[in-house]
Image: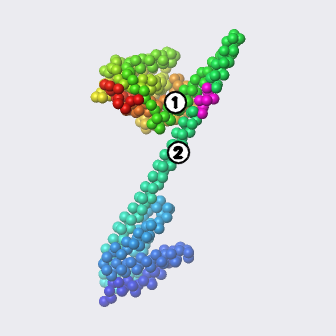
Amino acid sequence: MSKPSEILQNLFPVIENRVVLELTRGSLLKDEIADQFQSFYKHLLQALETGDPSWFDPLLNEWANSLTQSDLEDESIIINDFITQLVVIINQTIVENSKAEQSVQLITILLPIYAYLFNKTANIETSQKIQYLSKQVEKAKSDLAKLDESKSNFVAVAAHELKTPLTLIDGYTSMLIDVILKQNNNDLLVFTNGILNGSKRLRGIIEDMIDVSLLENNLLDLNYQPYWLNRILEFVLLELSPVCKERDISINIHDFDGYKLMNYGDSERLIQLFKNLIINAIKFTPDGGIISINGRKLSGFIEVLISDTGIGINQEDQAIIFEKFNRLGNIALHSSSKTKFKGGGPGLGLPIAKGIAEAHGGSIWVESSGYSETDFPGSTFHTLLPLFDNLPENSK
């Protein structure tokens, strides 16, 4: 009885012809398929002769390294599919050209080699695809980082460049007001005051843009000094009292544990933080609503809770609101105001508040059961700030 390798060797011309006919669709592919099959068949004979299927390893690695970008992006296992087709043709040819007993014996001997091929090919090709996708992910991360850096640089440059012409507008407007006052022309004062108010609003936006740039680049300097939380909150409420009166919104402060405790931090930045949070609460609370300020003293921290009876925030939006330039809802339907109900803005208040809290070593997050302009579920913003017994060592 002939050896299995001899039988397989004798069947080579028939199998090769069948492979070329069944696996090629155009004449240009015939030579390539023939070459690949010849290499495969040579390694198959070596594996069969020695009983060691690892003879295939160099060929499988070569095929894996030759995969194109399209192959790597494909979800299927390309090489395994090709080997499957070869195995089917080889087995069919063996069955059709050998006696039953002989074909069963030969295919049985080949089965461990086939199993090794499928397992090894799947591992190699999967590894290649993982490496490719990992590189694509890293490239995407790098591109996003560069894009984000470009955006940050643009914001910083734009903000600083806008300050110069704005200063000129303020200066010339002030001189114009002096001339108008000397002429006792009060009618023109309405227009000049309008210019100054618009300039003030624009300056505020520019300052926010600069603050965002500083926070993103970890360049925000904090001037640590003693502060009392109750004084900061009372100062903010005093500044916002005209708006609350206009909107008929009540703000209630509870005397919680730690409320009047002396702490260390940048009081000006903390005023900015709480002002942004309370303005946000005012903006999304309808006229006649209530804002409550409460808190508690924790181990090493103090937590401040600002709750409102406003429209609330959907769960999926509760992280987005802390991203810069983010605004929920239809922008076209929002009024351009910081304090009117659902008023618009550049979307920098909450990101700045979060950045200031984190610069102090704290954090900010929000809780809300959802969004509704009929039920008004409200929102609660939590601000966690560290408590210091003494001036922090790393403070400037």
Q: Under tag 2, what secondary structure?
A: helix
Quadrant of the snapshot with the N terminus: bottom left
* Residue 165 on the magenta span: yes
Give the number of the disc on residue 257. Answer: none
CB-based contact (under 8 Å), mark 2 and mark 1: no
Tell me the distance, in whole angstroms, between the alpha carbons under discs 2 and 1.
21 Å
On-image quarter of the C terminus: top left
Q: Position of residue 54 (x, y in %)?
A: 34, 73
Residue at horizontal 42 percent and vertical 62 percent from the top: 128
- Res 208 label: 1
Q: Is residue 28 visible?
A: yes
Mark 2 neighbour class, 10 Å CA radius: few under 14, some 14 to 19, many 20 or more: few
Residue 279 image position (x, y, % from top left):
48, 24
**Up/down of 330 relative to 174, above or below:** below
- Label 1, secondary structure: give it: helix
**Residue drawn 47% across the image and 59% down it:** 73
Residue nearest the observer in this picture, 261 or 274: 261
Q: Which mark is residue 147?
A: 2
**Vertical order, 267 against 218 (above or below):** above
Is 288 one of the magenta-colored residues?
A: no
Q: Residue at x 43, y 81 (%)?
A: 15
Q: Nearer the viewer, residue 52 or 227?
A: 227
Is residue 90 at least partly visible in the picture? no
Residue at image coords 35%, 67%: 119
Disc 1 residue type (three-letter): Asp
Determine whether 128 is above or below 27 in the image.
above
Left or right for 153, reference 394 = right
User: To which quarter of the image does residue 226 belong?
Assistant: top left
Q: Which residues are magenta?
A: 161-167
